[in-house]
Amino acid sequence: MNSPTIRTLTNEALEAFWRVVADHFPQAETGDLSPWADITLQTAAEAAVEEWIANNVPQPNEASQAEGAKP
């Protein structure tokens, strides 16, 4: 199975984020965000996703080391 790229994964997560925001404000007619806010949010979200993966998803070499470790 191919893993999504950080950017693809982040975009999917941000789409879900904005759906929740929009659901709470049905009177909104557009989804405008300033370019600077958009870039800042995208960059911060990508960094957070990357950090989350690094901290929570065992890497292949870590898993093999853990399997070979003696109790």
Image (spheres, rainbow, N blue to C red):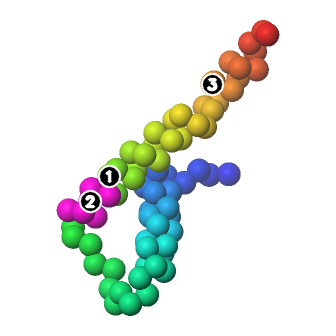
Q: Is residue 52 visible?
A: yes
- The residue pinned by badge 3 equals 61
Mark 1 packing: few (<14 Cα in 10 Å), some, or many (20+)? few
The residue under label 3 is which amino acid type?
Asn
Residue 9 location in percent, x, y? 50, 57
- Taking 32 as reference, is 63 above or below it? above
User: Does the stretch in magenta take in 32?
Assistant: no
Judging from the image, what secondary structure is the residue with disc 2 in? helix
Foreground label between 3 and 2? 2
Foreground label between 1 and 3? 1
Q: Nearer the viewer, residue 27 or 43?
A: 27
The residue under label 1 is which amino acid type?
Thr
How far apart in space, not on screen, are marks 2 and 1 (Cα)?
A: 6 Å
Q: Which residues are magenta?
A: 36-41
67 relative to 36 in the view: left or right? right
Question: Which badge, 1 or 3, is on the more N-terminal residue?
Answer: 1
Query: Which residue is found at the position 63% from the left and 24% from the top?
Result: 62
The residue under label 2 is which amino acid type?
Ile
Marks 2/1 in contact by CB < 8 Å: the verdict is yes
Question: Which badge, 3 or 2, is on the more N-terminal residue?
Answer: 2
User: Does the stretch in magenta take in 38?
Assistant: yes
Marks 1/3 in contact by CB < 8 Å: the verdict is no
Query: Which residue is found at the position 49% from the left and 52% from the top?
Result: 5
How far apart in space, not on screen, are marks 3 and 2 (Cα)?
A: 34 Å
Q: Is residue 8 visible?
A: no
Marks 3/2 in contact by CB < 8 Å: the verdict is no
- The residue pinned by badge 2 equals 39
- The residue pinned by badge 1 equals 43
Residue 43 location in percent, x, y? 32, 52
How far apart in space, not on screen, are marks 1 and 3 (Cα)?
A: 28 Å
Residue 58 location in percent, x, y? 63, 32
